Amino acid sequence: MRFITDLHIHSLYSRATSKNSNLRSLAAWAQIKGVQVLGTGDFTHPLWFRELKETLEPAEPGFFQLQGAIRPDFPLPFHSAPSPQSPPVRFVLSTEISSIYKHHGKVRKVHNLIFVPDFSSAERINETLAAIGNLASDGRPILGLDSRDLLEIVLEKAPGGFLVPAHIWTPWFSLFGSRSGFDSLEECFGDLSSHVFALETGLSSDPAMNRLISTLDRFTLVSNSDCHSPGKIGREATVFDTTFDFFGMKAALQIPCDESGHRHLAATIEFYPEEGKYHYDGHRLCGFSCDPYKSRELHGLCPVCGRPLTIGVLSRVLELADRQAPVFPQGAPDVYNLIPLQEILAELLGVGPGTKTVMNSYLQLLQQFGPELTILIDTPLAELSSAYPPLLGEAIGRMRRSHVQRNAGFDGVFGSIKVYKERKERVKAKR
């Protein structure tokens, strides 16, 4: 079965998250976007864990669903799923741990994702971690726990579970981060390294960038939104084609393509990496950014204030790269680089993405064509060309062909991806 997953999200108990990040709202937005399986996020938080146990019931093995009487909470102006064919959403028990600790004389700050198939496994992990730090302080708790030791806890307390390093290139909090990470996975996880089989690439990198590094060849690359509000679900996601349960999904991450050539991991859905907040090097306070080559000329110092630049994802990838061009494994998943539909509509309509004008157009398209990811990936361009607003079909066609204008993000500032260079080009295309 082919299905779309977004396995890294956060609840309302995480810092800087929307108060609407509850299960009913998350389920509704997953249907709006076209995501069939959603991580719960934050199962280590006591209040969220209690809500998960009270609100979810078992579905397929290792998957959960809203209890029978509980329905998704669609925001206005939505009244229901965008399509009668939208399947109910399943949940996977997940959480993210922020490990901050000293290793080989250096402070490391690494975020890791944990996935488990049942509440008893989650409970055992929670009991162990509660003795190490305060789980109630944040949905993504900060623990003075070595990543290797966290993995050992997962293996011991949740035999069916697994760990995935999160957004592995983010400068401040990740496996390979320029400010606090490692140069290899083995340095981080030591004797347990063989138990890590998947890596989350993050918003500021894509598979092609990661495949410049031969030591990552054995790992499956996955993408998730890391959303802090329900409306951002699915901005990155992973597409599976396997049995519809936790264990089939885990097996697909371990063996993404079998000997017959069948791809159990069919695709990843990606931001254009330039849109991520840490793609280029830069200094937010001075409004300065640059590519890795210019950064090296500047010796990593901001030309405005003289302070160190935040070294971004592209620089860090090139630092560890040992290839001139990416090498993909046989049967590698497809890659869809997308622009969120509301951003495309905002550009075509000449207004902000959060405006009522954009939302009304967004709703009309969902009612006509189905979930957002279906529109962006699968809907024939000829059909979209007859829809409102004008140039929608051409704009999505350009996006699918990667004929876009890129302005890279840096030092915590999102980049921007545009379909057209400027309004004049839109007018010319309309003619």
Image (cartoon, rainbow, N blue to C red):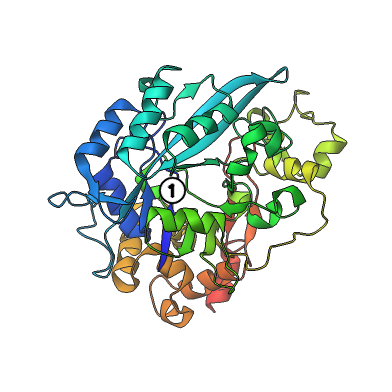
Query: What amino acid does circle 1 point to?
Result: Leu
Q: Position of residue 405 (x, y in %)?
A: 64, 59
Q: Position of residue 395 (x, y in %)?
A: 52, 69
Taking 274 as reference, is 139 above or below it?
above
Q: Element under label 1? A: loop
From where the camera sits, is residue 237 visible? no
**Residue farthest toward the bottom in the current orientation of the protein:** 382
Q: Residue at x 15, y 52 (%)?
A: 68
Taking 23 as reference, is 139 above or below it?
above
Using residue 371 as the reference point, say whether residue 162 is left or right of it: right
Mark 1 Cα shell of 10 Å, populated few (<14), some (14-19), many (≥20) = many
Relative depth, front residue between 17 and 27: 27
Q: Residue at x 41, y 70 (%)?
A: 389
**Quadrant where the N terminus is found in the figure:** bottom left
Q: Residue at x 51, y 65 (%)?
A: 264
Q: Position of residue 249 (x, y in %)?
A: 45, 56
